[in-house]
Image: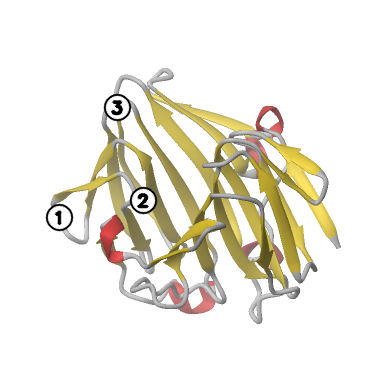
Amino acid sequence: MGIIVVKKEDQARGSFNNGEILENKPIGFPQDGGVQNAYSNLFYWAHAYTSKGSTVGLHPHKGFEIVSYVLKGAIKHYDTKTDKWLGIETGGFQVIKSGSGISHSEELEKDSEIFQIWFDPNLNESLYKEPSYEDYKSEMLPIETNKNRSIKTIVGEDSPVKLDTEGISIQEITLKQNFLLPLKSNYTHSIYVIRGKVNIIDEQMDKDDFAIVHEENELQIDGEIDSKLFIISSPIKPTYKTYINS
């Protein structure tokens, strides 16, 4: 029971093209140097940003499901399945089910930021599936608003997005006043502060801080009005062996 907070300065770092794209990684690869590695079926999480604009060249993926969510600005995406460049703007995102193998390239436009998150489906199945790519605009996603908060459901109930990775839900929450968020106690809840400052279980979190909450039935969220959180819920113990437990 409780919370683990990973401050931005303790997260892994990365870069592309001589620093044109910079990254902080709340969940990095073992060689990246951050304090937090993969858990549940959440394998990797990077926050990438650029002031100049730059392109990550064509590179392969296999097995994992990869979500790229545009926090600010816009990106262009190419993959060997669709064989064309497609644009995604703020609040939109792409889902790559890399399956038996796919290569892709991404161009981040000037002053853009994205999350890229890797999910670990049952690799004994996904490695033998045909790869696929889908993109989604922000207006395609359901938003529930009341006096306390606004919740945009990216993956989960009423969302058109379906992942193969077991038990994943993703929400973007904007704080209007302090509120109590119900949780599933048999799930891990991974929380990134996109904007503002919040207090969660007596821990203060600033912009770009990251928290892991588990075995809690509810979560009191206090903080600055208009603070924004990105929350991924995933099963504490998936029913299949994940990559790190194989």
Q: Nearer the viewer, mark 2 or mark 1?
A: 1
Q: CA distance from mark 2 to mark 1?
A: 14 Å
> Which residue of the protein is positioned furthest toward the right in this rendering?
1
According to the image, label 3 marks what residue?
54
Q: Foreground residue, 64 or 136?
A: 136
Q: Earlier in the sequence, mark 3 or mark 2?
A: 3
Specify the amino acid type for callout 2: Pro
Specify the amino acid type for callout 3: Ser
- Which residue is pictured at 60% across the width and 50% down the height? 177
Disc ID at residue 60: 2
Q: Residues within 10 Å of mark 3 (few under 14, many from 20)?
A: many
Q: Foreground residue, 152 or 84?
A: 152
Residue 212 locus on image (x, y percent): 72, 53
Q: Nearer the viewer, mark 3 or mark 2?
A: 3
Residue 165 locus on image (x, y percent): 51, 72
Q: Foreground residue, 95 or 30?
A: 95
Q: CA distance from mark 1 to mark 3?
A: 20 Å
206 displayed left or right of 201: left
